Amino acid sequence: MDLPARRQAASALADAERSRLPIEPLSKCYPGMDLDDAYAIQMLNIEDRLTAGSAVRGHKVGLTSKAMQTMLGVDQPDYGHLLTDMFIADRDVVAADRYLQPRVEIEIAFVLGSGLGGGGVTAADVLRATEFVVPAIEVIDSRIADWAITLEDTVADNGSSAGVVLGCRPTKIGDRDLRLVRGILERSGRLVETGLGAAVLGNPVSAVAWLANSLHQMGVALEAGHVVLPGSCTRAVDVVPGDVVRAEFDGLGDVVVCFE
């Protein structure tokens, strides 16, 4: 894709988000679109939002579990940006019609105490750089109709990210094996999903290292204070007005968001 085509695709996604009217898959509209095109389209919209006054507060890794890869028919992770206007307070109420076709995922969020960059980032580097972890709910949304997405579609659409809710109880990472931490997802008091941290690329720490190394190839480093969502340990769950979503991870506490 040339730059005008990339800009056209980015505008289509931005218009869909503003109008709450999803569009056809970009991969269908632009049959030659590849992963480089998709990340370039993502960055065009991120740059527009930064110009409008938002700021980067972190990144998300998506499609790290076999459940999510199978659900969306892809075979590798992706990443997107977390911006200031995407954060929702724990126990807050959010309008469901703020989104087009929202779903929720549960994750163990990493908050970095020091930066991660330079390439060759290892799991040990991630452990040293992490100040604490908290339970999180990611609100994902697709500007593509019916979630009919390829990897390129979701990458262009900022990894289908739309919102993040962080728990309020920080936990030091040093004495915990996150692979063995069990998470549960409740919707309106009913248990609907459960999974282990090991579902996320074998270890959520590995997902953060993957992200740092992938961003390095783009000339970007994770910064101190950034939030990193490493990916969901369960499949995503649809939400509608009236739903109360709660995520809890063993030993890490819980986090709640309400939809109206």
Image (cartoon, rainbow, N blue to C red):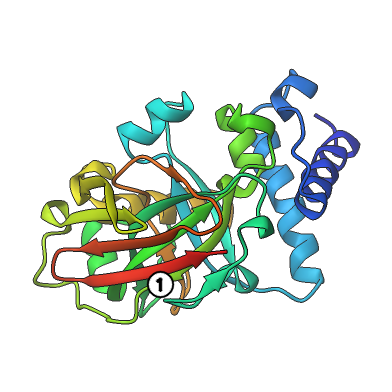
With respect to residue 260, does 154 lie above or below?
Answer: above
Residue occupying image coordinates x 65% and y 35%: 36
The location of residue 40, given as percent across then percent down, is 71, 44
Q: How many numbered circles are shown?
A: 1
| Label 1 sits on residue | 166
Percent from the top left, x then y, of residue 28?
73, 20
Residue 149 coordinates in the image, percent (x, y): 60, 29
Identify which residue is drawn at 43% across, 76% down. 91
On screen, residue 177 versus residue 213, left or right, reads left
Query: Relative to 70, is 242 above or below?
Result: below
**Image quarter hosting the C terminus:** bottom right
Say if residue 12 shows up in the picture.
yes
Q: Residue at x 66, y 41 (%)?
A: 156
On screen, residue 49 versus residue 153, left or right, reads right
Q: Relative to 91, does residue 147 appear above or below in the rendering?
A: above
Classify residue 37 by image quadrant: top right
* Front one among 102 and 25: 102
Residue at 74 percent across and 18 percent down: it is 31
Q: Nearer the viewer, residue 231 or 238?
A: 238
Check disc 1 and report its element: helix, strand or loop. Answer: strand
